[in-house]
Amino acid sequence: MQHEDLSTPVNRSSWLPGYGLVHIFRLVSKVNLQTASKVAAHLDRSNVRVNKWVIVRRGDRLDHKIVLNEISERNARDLRNELIAIDKDMSVRLEHLFLKEKILDDMVARHR
């Protein structure tokens, strides 16, 4: 088994021509709008563009789905760690997805 050197950035989009990399952050927090505000402020300070952010209340928790593109895998992992530090009771999961560029372009155009 090979282990990836995480200190070296890798452009995986060259592996799949015609596809772009998208990151989905799934956060679960208590029903606390201060936490959502802190996450929003941190994303703003991080200069990332949020393509989509959906918050759904499920009983005593909030489920967040935040979609970003135009961010590297390394930066996405760093951002995940920074978000975890915002609230010790919040869980954060990061997904890396490759989407066809046409779908990605349509998604970006709808959210501008």
Image (cartoon, helix red, strand yellow):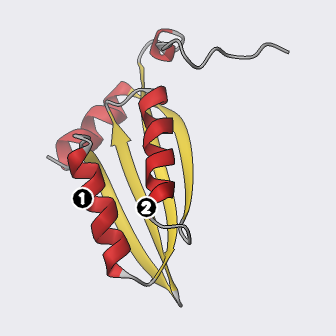
The front one of 74 and 102 is 74
N-terminal-most mark, 2 or 1 = 1
Q: Position of residue 17 (x, y in %)?
A: 45, 12
Q: Which residue is mark 1?
A: 41
Image mark for residue 86? 2
Q: Is residue 43 left or right of residue 32?
A: left
Residue depicted at 48% across the width and 56% down the height: 85
Gap between marks 2 and 1, in whole Å? Answer: 11 Å
- Circle 1 SS class: helix
- Outermost residue toward the bottom in this view: 59
**Going 44% across and 48% down the picture, which residue do you hit?**
82
Q: How many other residues sit within 10 Å of disc 2, few (<14), some (14-19) or many (≥20)?
A: some
Residue 5: horizontal and vertical position, in percent?
Answer: 64, 14
Q: Is residue 7 above or below residue 101?
A: above
Circle 2: element type:
helix
Q: Residue furthest left?
A: 112
Q: Is residue 112 left or right of residue 26?
A: left
In the image, residue 73 above or below residue 57: above
Q: Is residue 28 visible?
A: yes
